[in-house]
Image: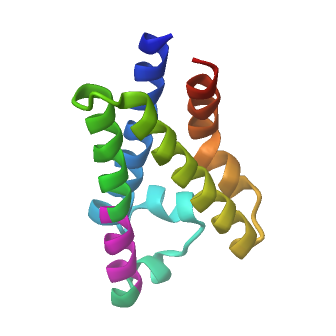
């Protein structure tokens, strides 16, 4: 079970590192626009770019915290449990505030699976 938890943790971390890439380094890309349902004009606005890059750093740090939990921490399960609950709550907030249910499934599906695995182990 620990191996499956580690693999799932790595997948969640990769997801958040990809989000960081889109928000921080590929802010004007077609993929970023498609992912966040934004137009090219939206993405080229300097205020929007600043907000995206700032949010990207947060997402990258979440990914790094997950990798730390998986590869370094002696309390992997406890740390992952807290991070997964955080991810799920943020996804719920995003869903409620935007009235877009797909945000919950896109942002937290892997986190929910990992949370269930952690609770079962």
Across and down, in percent, residue 100 comes to 75, 64
Residue stretch in magenta: 48-57
Residue 121, how many percent across, how many down?
57, 17
Q: In terms of secondary structure, what is the magenta stretch mainly?
A: helix
- Location of residue 44 with respect to 19 vertically, above or below: below
**Front-most of 40 and 3?**
3
Spot occupied by residue 80 in the image (x, y as percentages of width and height): 44, 37
Residue 32, quarter of picture: bottom left
Instruction: Relative to 44, say whether 64 is above or below.
Output: above
In this rendered view, identify the residue nearer to me: 54 or 67: 67
Question: In the picture shown, does residue 5 fall above or below 80?
Answer: above
55 part of magenta stretch: yes
What is the number of callouts on the image?
A: 0
- Left or right: where does residue 77 sit relative to residue 74? right
Tell me if residue 91 comes above or below residue 73 in the rendering: below
View extreme (left): residue: 72
Please name the residue shown 28% across and 45% down the image. Answer: 64
Instruction: Pick the residue in front: 74 or 35.
Output: 74
Answer with left or right where residue 15 lies relative to residue 96. left
Residue 61: percent from left, percent from top: 30, 54
The answer to whether residue 111 is magenta is no
The residue lying at 58 percent from left, 35 percent from top is 110
Instruction: Identify the residue at horizontal 78%, vertical 70% (top origin).
Output: 99
Q: Residue at x 54, y 57 (%)?
A: 35
């Amino acid at each position: 079970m620990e191996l499956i938890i580690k693999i799932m943790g790595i997948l969640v971390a990769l997801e958040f590192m990809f989000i960081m890439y889109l928000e921080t380094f590929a802010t004007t890309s077609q993929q970023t626009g498609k992912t966040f349902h934004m137009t090219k004009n939206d993405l080229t606005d300097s205020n929007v770019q600043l907000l995206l890059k700032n949010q990207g750093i947060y997402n990258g740090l979440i990914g790094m915290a997950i990798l730390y939990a998986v590869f370094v921490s002696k309390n992997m399960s406890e740390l992952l449990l807290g991070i997964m609950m955080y991810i799920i709550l943020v996804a719920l907030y995003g869903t409620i505030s935007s009235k877009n249910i797909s945000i919950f499934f896109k942002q937290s599906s892997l986190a929910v699976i990992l949370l269930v695995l952690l609770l079962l182990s």
